Amino acid sequence: MIKKIAVTLALLAIASTSFAETTLKPFQPTSLDQIEDTRKGESFIVILWSIDCPPCLKEFALLQQLKEEIPKDGLVLIATDNTEYSDSVHKLLSEFQLENMDNWIFADATPERLRYSIDPAWYGELPRAYFYNKSHQRFSHSGSLTKNQLQQWLLANQ
Amino acid sequence: MPHGSHKGASQALLAECLKSSTLPSPNCGRAPTAVFGPEGKLYVVFSQHGHIYLTTSSDKGKTFQPSIAVNRIPERIYDDGENRPKIVLGKSAEIYISWTHKTPGRYSGDVRFARSLDGGITFNTPITVNSDRAIISHRFENMSLDEKGQIYLIWIDKRERVKAQKNQQKYAGVSLYYAVSDNSGESFKPNQKLVDHSCECCRIAVDQDRSGRVVALWRHVYPDNIRDHAIAYVDPNHSPIQGLPMRATDDAWQIDGCPHHGPDLSMDSENRAHLVWFTQGEKNKGLMYGRFDFNEKKTSQIHSIDSAASASRPQVQVVGNSIYLMWKKLNDEQIDLLVSHSSDQGKSWSEANIVATTKHGSDHPDWLVHNRALYVAWHTQSEGLRLIPVTE
């Protein structure tokens, strides 16, 4: 029995280590404030996505392609799948080499609350992007971004 | 979870569900779907630990009989919100159950079906209904019977898109396929295509008209990525819909994205289709109601149910001469379930009435009708599966 517990604990330890490596942070109602606070005076993009959203992958392919043009801390990715889908979320991020971005995952029993904390006017359609300028005025976009759109914004907000 | 992601309520928070010794139950399982039998017995299917389970209740969901596993061999199952098991009862105690099995690929799945001819004591080995077995999407199935008792399964199918891609052709969205069984679910006739270019990620609504013919409503991808809704009779004697399918909603919502928010449909005694849907089009935004007339090929009595971003998951049900609407809404720290009705064919609507609330995660609500009495079935993390009477 004790052996069994030890094995379980060891497995848990491994599981939590690999989870830490994914740097998938739990997104809670105050998380957006935190994201904004750590980027004072900087422009950045927040993109909400889900493992269940084919057009989000189109967006990921684009982000992967333009990765070098995005400044450090310039991209925040928030998966709206809840934490029980962490593995699938991490797999997709790695596949598109986006695992080193600032990655978050919805972690609240009432996801409606999280959506509201991000934007009371967002209906939840995906992908959803928020473009913050240096003074943190933001505008939003629903649906996939085009390469042109993204490049132009990056150029204008260097 | 409403739009955005279509996950339903995740792990239950009820004390009974936290004990490992607890038997499978609709309170602790996922995506329970309920239907009343002729004598008022409640049948519930739900997903738990890789099984679809069936249970019954003789006291309107207060207590449940021990659950029976429909699939003996566990498998990965889509069981969140827009993806849930379905149950339909035949005229002679047949129980038909369908669900989507998650195959290894991304967005991939197979439509599964099992039946019981002995009132749910035993089930046949589940069958896969889609004849295309590529590891691609055959998902979001829905089920209906027609006047002859034939079973219709209709689902979102990616095979046409894959075919087009192989030929380096562009293909908007995916397609709808269906299959019919005329032998009480022993087997299904060959798969048939209903239409090309449906949206990829929204459930399909189905209902029977007065004479028992099957009607489907789905989010379509009209030219230039306009994701409004289409409606059609599902008739196995017809070839696939050519050109653009009949338009049921016209909001001009252009989006290269996933609404994850399918429509609902209820046919009335005059074969008019009562529709509810979610849109963010140029013309309308939020939760909408309308009544589609097949003769005029147009939707009238369009009514904005709730345009707030915090409102989601509209459902519609016709009972006698009344039309009932239901939806979810975030209200500060809780989620409210709201109901409004019309007794004058949608000319006027009652004020929204809160019929239930929850403080934690919640699944999509659904209607249940028994002897003209209307109930809402709602699965929430902290309360389990509830049956809430709306009319007496």
Image (spheres, rainbow, N blue to C red):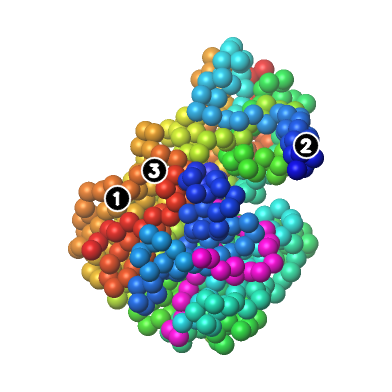
What mark, if any, has residue A6 been given in the picture?
A: 2
What mark, if any, has residue B355 been given in the picture?
A: 1
**Helix, strand or loop for the magenta stretch, by majority:** loop
Residue wearing tag 3: B358
Q: Please tell me which residue lies in front, B25 or A30.
A: B25
B382 horizontally vs B84: left or right? left
The answer to whether residue B346 is seen in the rendering is no
Distance from disc 2 to disc 3, alpha carbons, whole Å, reads 39 Å
Q: Position of residue B321 (x, y in %)?
A: 23, 69
> Residue under mark 3: which chain is it in?
B
Residues marked 2 and 1, same chain: no
| Residue B67 inside the magenta-drawn segment | yes
Q: Vertical placement of A123 versus B249: above or below?
A: above
The answer to whether residue A85 is seen in the rendering is yes
Magenta extent = B66-92
Name the residue type under label 3. Thr
Q: Position of residue B283 (x, y in %)?
A: 39, 48
Dot 2 lies on which element?
Answer: helix
Name the residue type under label 2. Ala
